[in-house]
Image: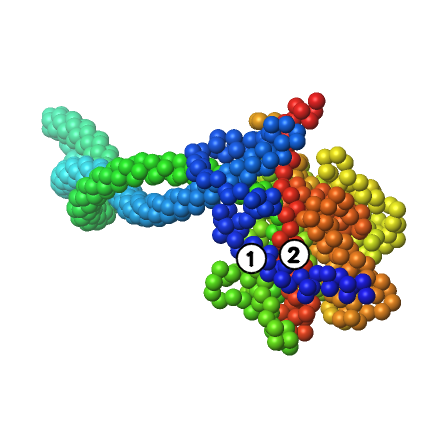
Amino acid sequence: MATRDRAARLGTPRLKENDAQYGKRQRTAGGPAARPPLSTASQNAPAPPPVEAPIEFSGREDVDALLNEKMKGKNKMDYKGKSEQMIEYIRKLRACIKWLLDREDANLAEIGKLTGLIDAAEKHHTEIVAQLESQIDESVATKEELQKQYASLEENLKKVEAETMVLLRSYGDEKEARIAAESSRNELSEELNRVKLDQKRLNDQIKMLQDTNKRLQEYNTSLQQYNCNLQADATKNAETTAKLQKEKNTMVETMNGLKDHANSVKMQLDLAKSSQGEALKQKNDLLKEVDTLRCELQQVREDRDHKSAEICSLLSDLSAHKELSGKTSMEIDNILNRCGALEETCSTQSERIKTLEIQLISANEKLKRSDLTTMETMTEYENQKRILEDLQLRLTEAEQKNVDGEKLRKKLHNTILELKGNIRVFCRVRPLLSNESGAVSYPKSGENIGRGVELMHNTQAYSFAFDKVFDHSASQEDVFTEISQLVQSALDGYKVCIFAYGQTGSGKTHTMMGNPEVHDLKGLIPRSLEQIFQTSQSLISQGWKYKMQASMLEIYNETIRDLLATNRTSVQDGVVSKYNIKHDANGNTQVSELTVVDVRSINEVSSLLKRAAQSRSVGKTQMNEESSRSHCVFTLRIFGVNEGTDQQVQGVLNLIDLAGSERLNKSGVTGDRLKETQAINKSLSCLADVIFSIAKKDEHIPFRNSKLTYLLQPCLGGDSKTLMFVNLSPESSSTSESICSLRFAARVNSCEIGIPRRQTQMRSLSQG
Ligand SMILES: Nc1ncnc2c1ncn2[C@@H]1O[C@H](COP(=O)(O)OP(=O)(O)OP(=O)(O)O)[C@@H](O)[C@H]1O
């Protein structure tokens, strides 16, 4: 019954209101001039509006001056004066917004132009660098090749020189050996000649000795003959003596008679005796002479033998010498042959050396030419480098301009958001499943392209427009790109709150968490954390140091559960009194005993997300097999200090996956699940009550009516940047549920809940 009441409150009767708000949104998008004045007093004023003088803005100072302008009446009760000032102030603000939008457009155009220039310069630069690099590579390759050739030629030359040296040395050795052999041959020839002369002399001597021997033999024969003759004479003389004796006897007989005769005969005997003595003497002398001659002969024979032996040895020496000289001549011939071959090799090597030298000269010339080309290329490279440096300088300047432009754009974005002051709403429609038929379409023309969504229900068409509508084809990255600036604000010290609202199975969890493990399926939570960590890293160079603390809880049946608690029993026990929500004066929220983890890297956050996903309670309904029946709140607190400027910022990023918003009759649940759905509906209805109450500027905002609204009080209370995703299921059976969600979203979108404020202060102040 209560749900029907709420549906009636948020549903059909509000269609007109929504259309009115839709018209208001269109006018807002058309520029500040089209936006109706905020104060109703000005609409009701009877007097015609005074002729307005055009307001000019020349720069930031004018905007700052306008922003710092204070409303002052003549006195406390001078409401008219104050309201006129207010009207004037609003007029100036409109002019300022227009001026800021113009400037933003101009800046965007300038950024576009600069980006184009940078792109062209980068392209040109890349082309030149590529050309130069290829030229340098070519010349380096040529140089290397020539150097290699040069080195190989030098090596060859060295080898050839070494070979030539070896050959020359061996040639010298051979020459020396040849000279030595020739001198030894000459010596041997001389010795041979000498030996031949000796031989000749010895032959002459032998011949002479043989002659002497022959003569001595003849002399010996003649002496033997003479001796025989003497012996024959001696025999004859003995016969004569005997005859004479006989005759003596005869004579003795006749001696007496023949004494004279005897004496004369005696005298003849003595004479014969002395001639015999002489002959004996002669014989002895001759014998002695024969002995001497024999000795001499012996001597001559010995000499002859000795000389013969000498001749034999000389002959053997001669034959050895002859052999040696034959060998030596052969060796000499060999050596001469080798000498010839070596001379031939030498001449070939000389020719090769000459060719190599010619090649070397041409290689040197080539090297010189390539050196020259390299020098030219280097000069060209230096020129291009200078151009490049110039371009890089210009690029840096352009980048700096870009950064400045970005800063200004960010500031303007924040200013516009601050001036707008309402909750932004994005709509996302999930793709159809295979067995579903669709009932959602999108405007194909007009202002609402990309912002509008249309539904057919009971032959009636419903159209809605939001800040952005993502159709079924939008990727996780497309969605994140749109909210990345908002996430960035958390680092700048804003409280940021992004929540996903929609019926069960409409894609809330897919949008908020997705699949953190798969790059393309990562949802807003992992992508936001990645961006925050990356940006915080890049801001280190500007003196910023950040500390981040994460917590994650779910609200199930109005009970808080700590999803990061390591003690699982305490999580499942879910002791209600344990987690009390408190807000301090600075609008910071604390949940007692909730696990708050210091995170220093994206990896740490990833593991936390995994831990939380495991802890999350998942129920079953008829609509979605894994429908999450709790609100899941991820909170990242960011504390930033700038060491250079002593500036401190404190931002909060709340990413909330709300429980499914389906109505009871559709989910068809009973028992525990009914209680669950009632609790969900209650907290979502409380969320709507809070938002509308803020929009109506009620004195009492019912934050405490549910745990969710109380927890998010600082983020809903006006000084935060809030974005709501309304997720839709496109199938026709969900149309009525989708229309409810869209009506709620359109109403939220029209609410002005306040101006977001950046939480920033100086360190000394906070410390003091
Ligand atoms: N944009 C999308 N692209 C592809 N698949 C999607 C998309 N949105 C949702 N889905 C798929 O639809 C199914 C339901 O989505 P999801 O669980 O995110 O719904 P939910 O609104 O979170 O449901 P519950 O309220 O029960 O938690 C999932 O299988 C999810 O992967």
Up the image or down, 100 lies above or below 685; here it is above
Left/right placement of residue 28 relative to residue 188 reads right
Residue 582 percent coordinates (x, y): 80, 40
Please state which of residues 165 and 737 is positioned toward the viewer in this rendering: 737
Left/right placement of residue 201 relative to residue 569 reads left
> In the rendered view of the protein, which quadrant contains the N terminus?
bottom right
Q: Residue at x 56, y 34 (%)?
A: 85
> In the rendered view of the protein, which quadrant contains the C terminus?
top right
Dot 1 crowding, Cα within 10 Å, few <14, some 14–19, many 20+: few
Give the amino acid at mark 1: Gly
Q: Hey, which quadrant is residue 277 in on the image?
A: top left
Disc count in the image?
2
Please state which of residues 619 and 419 is positioned toward the viewer in this rendering: 419
N-terminal label among 2 and 1: 1
- Mark 1 lies on residue: 23
Residue 724 percent coordinates (x, y): 65, 54
Q: Residue at x 88, y 50 (%)?
A: 575
- Mark 2 lies on residue: 747
Dot 2 crowding, Cα within 10 Å, few <14, some 14–19, many 20+: many
Q: Is there any visible trace of residue 369 in the rendered image? A: yes
Q: Circle 2 sits in a helix, a strand or a loop, which is it?
A: helix
Left/right placement of residue 714 relative to residue 89 reads right
Q: Hey, which quadrant is residue 84 in on the image?
A: top right
Q: Residue at x 53, y 55 (%)?
A: 26
Q: Is there any visible trace of residue 141 in the rendered image? A: no
Q: Is mark 2 within 8 Å of ligand 1?
A: no
Residue 149 percent coordinates (x, y): 27, 46
Give the amino acid at mark 2: Arg
Q: Hey, which quadrant is residue 718 in on the image?
A: top right
Q: Circle 1 sits in a helix, a strand or a loop, which is it?
A: helix
Distance (Cα) linking label 2 and label 1: 12 Å
Residue 104 percent coordinates (x, y): 46, 43
